[in-house]
Image (spheres, rainbow, N blue to C red):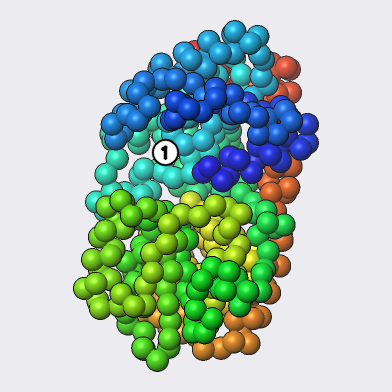
Amino acid sequence: MNVYVLATVHELASRGVVVDVFTRSHDPSDPQVIDLAPGARVVHLEAGPVRPEKNGAFDLLPEFTDRVVDFVNNEGGEYDVIVSHYWLSGLVGEQLSARWALPHITSFHTLAEVKRRARPGEVEIPERAAGERQIARNADRVIAWSAHERDLLSDLYGADKDHVLIIPPGVDTKMFRPHDKQASRKKLGLPGSGKILMYVGRVERLKGIEILIQAVAGMEEEDDVTLLIVGGADSDPERHRLNDVVDRLGITDRVKFLPSVKQEQLPEYYSAADVCVFPSYYESFGLAALESMACGTPVVASRVGGLPSIVREGETGYLIPTRCPAAFIQRIEILITNDHLRTLMGRAARERALELGWGVAVDRLIAVFCGLAEERVLGTLGTSSISAAD
């Protein structure tokens, strides 16, 4: 979500759109206002403790909303639209929409009910699903990343399909581009020989990383495969659990955990890999898969959520319909044992990524913003916005 917001803001600013991003202060040393680009800035506002208890941010929403209003009133600022990301910000967006009589556009990124169905045992505070349902029904527009997400918003949350627009995220194809594999491996201190599988993303159970670890354990040792898991921190409970799985399977020499890296470093990692694997139980989109493809590295991923809208089966990689390690082993081994096929898929992956640049996504977002602003001026804004204001 951070990558999405930052990239979108930079693209909007480059087109002359003025953007303020409001967020709760997480570090007392941060200045209140940080300029991101000409016309775009981040505004940090104090609301509650710097590090609230887990799930404590929900109770801080009224205070945060008041801080946003105070800041805007003090500056004398004025906006045309409100855009929110994730359900907590969506609830704030609803309140601001009502106070200022402005259209509200939201994106959820993940949905509680979908996570629960994708992996039983996922626990969320009870206010989340109710809040998401409220936001989905009241927002003037909801931005979904795939037809699958749009259908879920309609079927599970009662959103008006006419108000749910499919606008996939983009990828920075200038930053994420193919690098020389051997040079990347040398730069990162990785083995020059052998095959490298890579997972990039958050380390949490919903990502299905254990499936990938089991797949590596089930591969023939002569395959000479190393799995790199990039993301998370040593202190993450899920990282500890996965380490125990690796130890139990006796493959500590074949699996390496690496910390999260900066965006500008990721192209070297993607380029160093032979295949990137994303065995998620659910993905609203799968931005890391698109980044990998932009770097010319084919993808093996679960056939869930928005991933089928990115990965073209048999062309840019493979989509796995089951959560069985054996299915992943089969497709991974096809790729790592066939250099020519892997090269062809890597080229096709890069071509596919070029169709999904940030410029395309932001052009469509601007059209939505302008349309809603015009409706507001003409007094024809959708009934869902009027209902929220009431």
The type of residue carrying mark 1 is Tyr
Q: Residue 197, percent across and down?
A: 47, 74
Q: Residue 232, percent across and down?
A: 39, 53
- Identified at 65% across, 29% down, the residue is 35
Looking at the image, residue 177 lies above or below residue 144? below
Looking at the image, residue 380 lies above or below residue 185? above
Q: Is residue 55 visible?
A: yes
- Identified at 59% across, 13% down, the residue is 72
- Identified at 45% across, 65% down, the residue is 199
Q: Quadrant of residue 338?
A: bottom right
Seen from the viewer's position, the closer of residues 305 and 237 is 237
Q: Quadrant of residue 341?
A: bottom right
> Residue farthest to the left?
248
Seen from the viewer's position, the closer of residues 6 and 140 is 6
Q: Residue 367, percent across and down?
A: 73, 36
- Identified at 51% across, 71% down, the residue is 189
The residue where tag 1 is placed is: 157
> Residue farthest to the bottom?
222
Q: Residue 145, percent across and down?
A: 56, 48
| Left or right placement of residue 29 versus residue 116 in this view | right
Q: Quadrant of residue 368?
A: top right
Q: How crowded is the residue under tag 1: few (<14 C-alpha within 10 Å), some, or many (20+)?
A: some
Looking at the image, residue 80 lies above or below residue 319? above
Q: Is residue 93 visible?
A: no
Tag 1, which secondary structure? helix
Seen from the viewer's position, the closer of residues 70 and 135 is 70
